[in-house]
Image: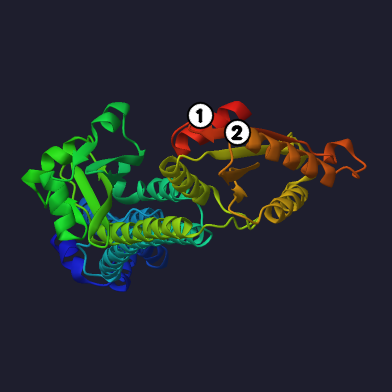
Amino acid sequence: MAKVISLSSRGIKYKLIVAVCLMSVIPFLVCLNYIFPSLLTNLMTRSILPLLLVIMLGMIILGFIIIKQILDPVVNLSRHASLIAEGNFEKPINTQGEDEVGQLGKALNQLTVKIKRSMDELKDYGSKTAQINMEIQKRVFFMAALLQISDLIAQGEKLDAILHICLEKVKDLAHSSASFILFFEEGIFSLKVQFGLIQEVQTKAVFSEHNECVRQIFAKGAVTIIDAKNQKPLCQRFVSVFGVKNFLGFPIASRQKPIALLGIGNDSLDFAYSEEDIELFNIFGKQMSIAIENNLLLERLEKLEIKDALTGLYNEQYLHHRLDEEIKRAILAQRPCSFILARIHNFEGYQKLHGPIAAETVFKKISSYLNSAFSGIECVGRFGDYQFAVILPEKNKRQAEKVAEELKARIEYLFKDESCEDRKFQMVMTVAENPLDGVSAQELILFAQNCLS
């Protein structure tokens, strides 16, 4: 056995030579007996045959042991190679020998370690790539949402529609469970639009302008953060009203006066907002500021405008203001003042049947006549979608009713030559007088509308 152990550091070629030599002794002796028959006989006569047999048997066993030392590592190496091919890199190859198989085993172990390290790096890289792709998709989603909101603002969409879309999109930011906007009116912040808040919260979410947290948010003038890393005791009660623990708030102001407060939040434990979440929320806040500012500008412009864009007549807002002034003047001078409200009969049905372009043509035709019919102190304008109004200073109700009858007849005369019956329009009119039917513009208009309906 000592001989076998000493062979462990030898190469496979040397081991095979030794094994072949040892296992070839018997065939060699048999052949030798054929060539020299008397040699084996002489040996046997000397009574050493048992010893020779033991030596030969030992040599054969030793040869088999050497061959097994060669084959076992090869088989083991083949088995481990199959495992490596299947993707199992955990179990290393036993490399006790110093021969070629042992060196190959060590090389495979080193290769396996490198492959495993490369696979781990690739897996880690794949995980990072997937995370980067998710972040990119997230940014693309929010950028697309911001572009959509910008388009709506540019198209002059109503503020409520813009707020709904914006809050719906911003709710997907930072794992938020709720998004909302509080509008400031008459010293009170109250909910305008929300997503994710229960009914009980909606009734409680009313705050005074003197609320300490609200004052802090507007004093800061930037995004306010409340999470695991940013605790603000004064704002905890404010935030808890919305049923959240973590909160991002953006103050919206105009001319250094508060207008609205945008907020999102979630109820996660040990949560902290990332810089990216804060940056995106800040962009949405600024976008909503633009939308609200734009709406305020449009409202100011509408207040400045006195003419209707479609008909060229005075608009409804101006008629309210003018009627109010005429009534005040009539009261001071103790003179009458009347108001005529007229509607085109069945005009909505005509519009549905023939389309908006045909309806606008009819509306402009009537408006043109009304504009030319009055040139004195009277004031005629568009009132609502399908109505007209005439303010008649110095005329009582009887005189105004006569004017209304003449207008009705003349307008209907404009369409007398139409071939289709649905194009022969008729007018429905009502008259109200101050102070008989009301002592203010609002009362006269309400009286006339009730009579017209």
- Tell me: residue 50, above or below residue 104: above
Residue 40 showing in the rendered view: no
308 or 249, nearer to the observer = 308
Q: Residue placed at 16% from the left, 62% from the top? A: 5
> Disc 2 versus disc 1: distance between alpha carbons?
9 Å
Q: Quadrant of residue 397?
A: top right
Residue, far left: 233
253 or 56, nearer to the observer = 253
Q: Is residue 119 left or right of residue 137?
A: left
Mark 2–mark 1 contact, CB under 8 Å?
A: yes
11 or 24, nearer to the observer = 11
The C terminus lies in quadrant = top right
- Tell me: residue 171, above or below residue 305: above
Which residue bears the numbered disc 2?
A: 397
Which residue bears the numbered disc 1?
A: 436
Q: How far across and down, in percent of the image, does residue 66 sit?
A: 27, 60
209 or 32, nearer to the observer = 209
Q: Amino acid at mark 2?
A: Lys
Q: How far across and down, in percent of the image, does residue 280 sit?
A: 32, 60
The N terminus lies in quadrant = bottom left
Q: Residues within 10 Å of mark 1 (few under 14, many from 20)?
A: few
Q: Is residue 266 left or right of residue 323?
A: left
Q: Amino acid at mark 1?
A: Leu
